[in-house]
Amino acid sequence: MKIFVDTRSGVPIYKQIVQQIEKGIMGGLLKPGDQLPTVREVALELTINPNTVARAYRELEHGGLIESIQGRGSFVAADLPRPTGEDTEMIIKEKIEELLREARQLNISPAKLEKMFKKALDK
């Protein structure tokens, strides 16, 4: 799983990392026991401070989503509850609502937004 950050989003970078890993786990891209890239690897790839990545990993570990093993790395926790279809739908619904708010603020018509969405789906 590749991690992306948007420095202009207003969301702290560590939080973006946490959210993407959470979604990767909920969506099944990351499975229990999968090893995450090291803090150093993520920091180098994203050209960010390693402490930022370490903070994200600590938050994920505190939330029980990952387990860190000294000298071996960080892994998706083995005893994760499986997300339901409702969980994943809720995430997408929130994103759609956020997109609609932004489209209204930018004065993008529903018809234009629909065309943009269909074009993105075709890619």
Image (cartoon, rainbow, N blue to C red):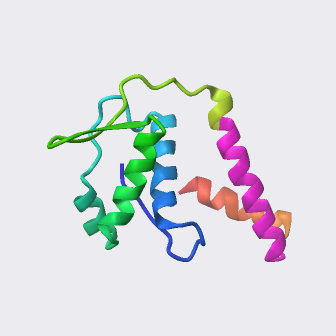
Q: Position of residue 28 (x, y in %)?
A: 45, 33
Q: Is residue 21 visible?
A: yes
Could you tell whether 72 is left or right of 16 in the image?
Answer: left
Could you tell whether 62 is left or right of 109 in the image?
Answer: left
Residues drawn in magenta: 89-108
Say above or below: 62 vs 86: below
Say above or below: 57 vs 40: above
The image shows a total of numbered marks equal to: 0
Q: Is residue 114 visible?
A: no
Q: Is residue 87 magenta?
A: no
Corner quadrant of residue 74: top left
Corner quadrant of residue 65: top left
Please identify the residue farthest to the left as the structure is shown.
71
What residue is shown at x 27% (from left), y 57% (from top)?
39
What residue is shown at x 84% (from left), y 76% (from top)?
107
Which of 97 and 17 lies nearest the eye of the viewer?
Answer: 17
Q: Position of residue 11 (x, y in %)?
A: 58, 66
Which of 76 and 118 lies nearest the eye of the viewer?
Answer: 76
